[in-house]
Amino acid sequence: MFIQTVALNDVKCFALHGYYPEEQVTGTEFLVSVMVTFYPSGDTEDLQRTVNYEVLNHIIQEEMASTKQLLESVVKQILDRVIAAYPFVITAVTGIKKMHPPMPGEINHSFVQLTYTSEKYRQY
């Protein structure tokens, strides 16, 4: 049995997410990644039987355009929409890197990630 992975890595978005009011005014660059796994079905040429990464990109773009204070909220919204669009996924992982967060020191990025595993496949 095969498990297929479909992913978008480091989708660059400029957005206004941030806890502090000035972050929601000036904005910054973010890199968003989404990865899902699922059991592929018969026809590998049928876009309706797979996860369409154009749909993933659309979800990312819409959620990044909706300003939130915490990246935890954004990754949860993205993940919820991916699962709703593709209820057959086994796992889904969403991560957001906030490039050069406004803190002392030279910081490349902060990172928030959320992982979903279908209840059907969870091992306790």
Image: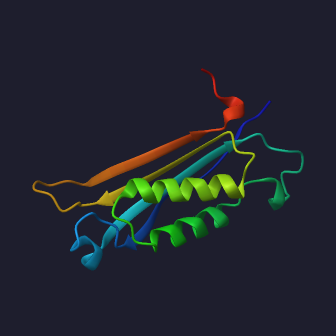
Measuring from the top left, give residue 116's x and y in whole percent: 57, 41
- Residue ranking furthest to the right: 42
In the picture, residue 23 is in which quadrant? bottom left
- Residue ranking furthest to the left: 104
For the point 29% across and 65% down, the residue is 18
For the point 80% across and 60% down, the residue is 47
Residue 5 drawn above or below residue 15: above
What count of labels does the image hold? 0
Q: How does the figure colour the protein chain or chains?
A: rainbow
Measuring from the top left, give residue 40's x and y in whole percent: 79, 43
For the point 21% across and 74% down, the residue is 22
- Residue ranking furthest to the top: 124
Residue 69 drawn above or below residue 113: below
In the image, taking residue 96 as reference, residue 35 lies left or right, namely right
Quarter of the image with the C terminus in it:
top right
In the picture, residue 14 is in which quadrant? bottom left
Q: Residue 18 or 94: which is nearer the viewer?
A: 18
Measuring from the top left, give residue 92's x and y in whole percent: 59, 45
For the point 70% across and 44% down, the residue is 89
Measuring from the top left, give residue 67's x and y in whole percent: 40, 71
Quarter of the image with the N terminus in it:
top right
